[in-house]
Structure formats: C-alpha cells, structure tokens
Amino acid sequence: MNEQSSDESPVLSAKNIVKHFPVGGLKRGKVVHATEDVSLDLYAGKVVALVGESGSGKSTIAKLLSQLVPITSGTIELNGVEAHAASGRKFKEYTNQVQMIFQDPFGSLNSIHTIRYILGRALQIHKRGLHGAKLEGAVIELLQRVKLTPAERYIDKFPHELSGGQRQRVSIARALAADPKVLLADEPISMLDVSIRLGILNLLKDLRDNEGIAILYITHDVASARYFADETLVMYAGRVIERGKSEMVTQHPSHPYTDLLVNSAPDPDSLNALRGEAHGEAPSLIDPPSGCRFRTRCPFATDLCAQEVPPTVKAATGQEVACWLYTDHPGAMVNIGNKGDLKTIHDMELPTDVKEKIAQNKEVHS
Ligand SMILES: Nc1ncnc2c1ncn2[C@@H]1O[C@H](COP(=O)(O)OP(=O)(O)OP(=O)(O)O)[C@@H](O)[C@H]1O
C-alpha cells in the first residue's frame, strides 16, 4: 500500500475504517456514509497527505484516528496494538502519542490565559509532577521547538496579542507538550495568511525530519501536498480513490477525479460552487451512488461503474487507483491498464464524445 520497506512498521495504522453518522429529522433511521473502508499507515518521519474537496470525509478520518469519535467498523492500531481508547486512562495514554492540530488557531486557544499558562497546563496534563523552574524551562523549550524565539518575548503574551501564524505555532507547541509520535494536522494552514503558510509547513517538516514525528496532513490544497507530503491519498465521497507518491499523484494523476482535482487547483472548492450543475454535483452521502461514487460526474462511467465498487489496482505510474479503467475488465469504457506502458488518462486515444465530455468537465471546473 505504500513505499515503506517491509521491516518498518507503521506507528499508526487504520484498517478498513468505516464511519456512518446517524441522521435525525425527516431522514431518521438513515446514516451519512462519511467514510467507507479507508486504510492508511503513518510512519515515523513521514508525512501522509489526505486531499479532497469539502465533505469528502477528511476531517472524519482525523477524528476517528484521534479517537474523538468512535469508528463504526474497522480497526485502528497504535504501535501494532489495537486501540480502544473510548475514555479514561486509555484515552489519555492514546492522546499522549497521537495529538491533533486544528485549522483555527484563533478558536483553539483560550484567550483569557497567557502562553505560559496554556503550555504549562498542557505539560502538566501529560507529565504529572512538573512545576516551578522545571515547568518554566519546559515551556521555554516548547516555544523554542516551534521557533518562537526568544521565548521570553512570547511567554507572557495572550493569544490575541499574537499573529495567526504565531498562534498556530503555540497550538503546535501545545500538541508537542505530550511528546507525541503522531500529529494529525487538519488543515493547519488554511486559515492563515498566504505569506505565513510556508513557515508553518516548514516547521512541521522540521518536526518530521528532526524529531521523526509521523504526520497526517489534511488539506484542500494539492500544491501543498506535493511540497510537504511523502505520500498523498485522494478521497472522494468517503472513499480513498487514489494513493501514491505525492509527486506522482499530483503531477500524473491516474484517477479521473484526481485529474479533475489537480486541474481545478489552486481552489478545489471551486468544485463546490458547481453543486447542482450537471458536471459538478457531489453525491449525497446519505444515499451514495452504487458502485463507484464518482461515476455520476465521471466522463468514463459505464454500467459496470454503477454495478460494482472498482477494485484498487496498481497503475503503471505506480499509484494505487480504484477505477475500472485500470483493470482489464471488458465492461470498462477503455482499459488504460496497468501493463507497464506508462499510460494515463492524458495520453489515451479517446473517442471524440469522451474527449468533449472531459473538455466540458474541465471548463466547468476551472
Ligand atoms: N457529526 C456528524 N453527523 C452527521 N454527519 C456528519 C458529522 N460529521 C461529519 N458529517 C458528514 O460526513 C461527511 C464528511 O464530512 P467531513 O467533515 O469529514 O469532510 P471533509 O472532507 O473534512 O470536509 P471539510 O474539508 O469541509 O472539512 C459530510 O457529509 C458531513 O456532513
């Protein structure tokens, strides 16, 4: 499933995780199929990006991996041991190793406390018995780890006295107070000014490279996944539809949806503006399409795509892709195949009507 050597074990591993949220009101008794059969592995010193448009299930994955919400089925393993961390001591042991960083550095820090208090409190939660000069030293060390230096300049400030980027650094420092093995970063830069985003990504890169922290990086932004992540997983309507080395997934997308996503960059959410239009409609997750969930928007869809969920196969470009086009099935419109001839949907000899449909699709989405 990934490019790691087989003797290296993942720190955090999700196997076939499913999350169905019950819905109320008129649709009582039904469920939102938020994530379906998602597997992913996070390794020490590696970043995995999860990309996809809004509502594709990215945040749900982060919440499941952080044990903030229970999984419907599947398993989560931390250091090879199945994790059931619903509450109490086990939950604390789990969160000592797996920490989340949230999108909103404005809302996630309590504005009535100083940075000294916020970080000191986090340290005391995770390391009992720390106080006095040792606690002060540990707070300063945390500020240094997130490059808020000299630490004395920041330690007595309140969150509202800091910039968005500085606040996000404090949020990261708070997560580091636990000395985690894994950081789950849910859109950590999307609310920040464009000019300071790179600084935060570079800080996370340093934590990956120098401290060996495993990072899940959730983003809408394909370009930042390419810059920052070793591996990229693309989600569509709750399913992973493509995964592989970030460079390949973002530069040579295999799945028709990834192709659309990459070509709608820099703002994949422009896709959302199209909801309701023929080519842009994202499917309902209460009654998701049968078979491939992308088939309602896909120029290559055939009856087969409606009948069966496509298997995940290896494309010639190395990515794993869940699409009938990459199989030899006679029911697929064409077989791009995984036969080693380095073809993707870009260099296909396509029927004119399909070419027109793709062009129309891209025009609508650009
Ligand atoms: N607590 C909940 N109850 C019911 N449905 C939920 C709940 N949380 C999420 N969902 C639904 O699950 C689906 C996936 O949502 P999720 O927030 O994981 O997507 P996302 O890709 O992270 O989107 P965004 O980028 O906007 O955060 C959506 O249809 C959402 O409405």
Image: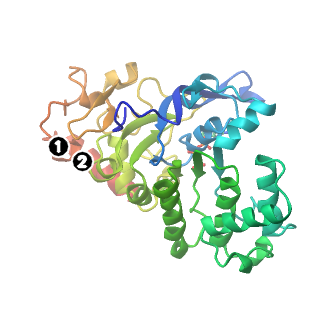
Front position in the image: 335 or 351: 335
Q: Which of 311 and 214 is in front in this view?
A: 214
Quarter of the view holding residue 223: bottom left
311, 237: nearer the viewer: 311
From what the image shows, is residue 193 above or below residue 292? below
The mark found on residue 205 in the picture is none
The image shows residue 143 at horizontal and vertical percentages of 67, 68
Residue identified by numbered label 2: 356
Q: Answer yes or no: is residue 104 visible.
A: no
Quarter occupied by residue 144: bottom right
**Residue 301 spot, x, y in % from top left:** 32, 32
Q: How is the image coloured?
A: rainbow
Question: What amino acid type should be assigned to the residue bearing mark 2?
Answer: Glu
222 with respect to 302 (left or right): right
- Within 10 angstroms of label 1, few (less than 14), some, or many (20 or more) residues? few
Quarter holding the N terminus? top left
Q: Quadrant of ligand 1?
A: top right
Say which residue label 1 marks. 352
Determine the CA span between mark 2 and mark 1: 6 Å
For label 1, the SS is: helix
Q: Which amino acid does label 1 sit on?
A: Thr
With 361 as the anchor, is 220 left or right in this view? right
Foreground of the two, 118 or 193: 118
Q: Where is residue 335 in the image (x, y as percent from the top left)?
A: 19, 29
Image location of residue 185, percent across then percent down: 58, 51
The residue at label 1 has a CB less than 8 Å from ligand 1: no
Query: Answer yes or no: do the residues labelled 2 and 1 have beta carbons within 8 Å?
Result: yes
Mark 2 secondary-structure assignment? helix
Q: In which quarter of the image is the C terminus?
A: bottom left
